[in-house]
Image (cartoon, grey):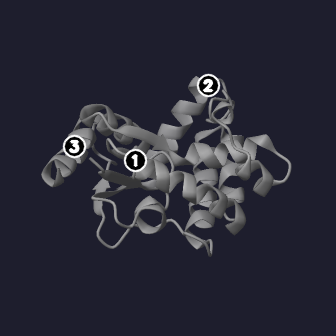
Amino acid sequence: MIFTVAIDGPAAAGKGTISRAVAERFGFAHLDTGLLYRAVGAKGGDPVAAAEGLTPADLARGDLRSAAAGQAASRIAAIPAVRAALVAFQRRFARAEGGAVLDGRDIGTVICPEAEVKLYVTASDAVRAHRRWLELSAQGERVTEAEVLAQLQERDRRDSERATAPLRPAADAVLLDTSTLAVEEAVARAIAEVSARL
């Protein structure tokens, strides 16, 4: 069975948590596409060469969830040649036998416009900043919630305004605002959308 679930949205909205839960519930493969860009940014050097030579080991680095890796990912994701190098990999993953869940910023609009389910997961800036601040603090990063908010807003602006594959919901995506939802509620809504189309 080929069945693709595309989950897009800004940072810290909950798309990763929801994506992993949906993949586990249905036995689908999962790809956090942001890790591809974080890994390319973390490798340093020429970003196009880094994207073309990306390996599974690069995706297993322990520093890919840091604030610095996130900022690097956003910067290199604006480079068309980097995006082109990673698009084919993502499309093959999405349409492989057995079903797949991909989360990112342009899955439903660019990578898999034919996805059977498209979700756009979002939350208010304040809620997202608080979530990311808790996550970074737990990792030992010393950063204020106000700094995290400023970084998120800058990244949102850069991701939304880039010429290539800007962050935006697909026209046929289901909007899932997690601002006031518990994790279990958000996951249940996503699972219901997938179940309805299977």
Question: Is the residue marked by circle 3 packed among few (<14), some (14-19), or many (20+) residues within 10 Å?
Answer: some
Can residue 75 be seen by looking at this rendering?
yes
Residue 2 screen position, x and y as percent:
30, 50
Relative horizontal placement of residue 22, taking residue 59 as reference (left or right): left
Q: In the rendered structure, which disc, 3 or 2, sits on the residue that comes first in sequence?
A: 2
Q: Residue at x 66, y 41 (%)?
A: 67
Q: Residue at x 66, y 58 (%)?
A: 85
Q: In the rendered structure, which disc, 2 or 1, sits on the residue that comes first in sequence?
A: 1
In space, the residues marked 3 and 1 are separated at their CA atoms by 20 Å
Up the image or down, 172 lies above or below 107; here it is: below
Can residue 10 be seen by looking at this rendering?
no
30 or 156, which is in the foreground? 30
Relative horizontal placement of residue 135, taking residue 27 as reference (left or right): right
Label 3 amino acid? Ile
Residue 149 screen position, x and y as percent:
57, 50
Q: In the rendered structure, which disc, 3 or 1, sits on the residue that comes first in sequence?
A: 1
Q: Which mark is residue 139?
A: 2
Relative horizontal placement of residue 20, taking residue 33 as reference (left or right): left
In space, the residues marked 2 and 1 are separated at their CA atoms by 34 Å
Residue 128 screen position, x and y as percent:
47, 47
Question: Is the residue marked by circle 1 packed among few (<14), some (14-19), or many (20+) residues within 10 Å?
Answer: some
In space, the residues marked 3 and 2 are separated at their CA atoms by 29 Å
Dividing the picture into quarters, in which one does residue 184 lie?
top left
Relative horizontal placement of residue 183, taking residue 147 as reference (left or right): left
Q: Which mark is residue 191?
A: 3
What SS does tag 2 mark? loop
Which residue matches tag 1?
Answer: 96
What SS does tag 3 mark? helix
Up the image or down, 172 lies above or below 126; here it is: below
Question: Is the residue marked by circle 2 packed among few (<14), some (14-19), or many (20+) residues within 10 Å?
Answer: few
Q: Residue at x 30, y 64 (%)?
A: 173
> Is label 3 or label 1 in front?
1
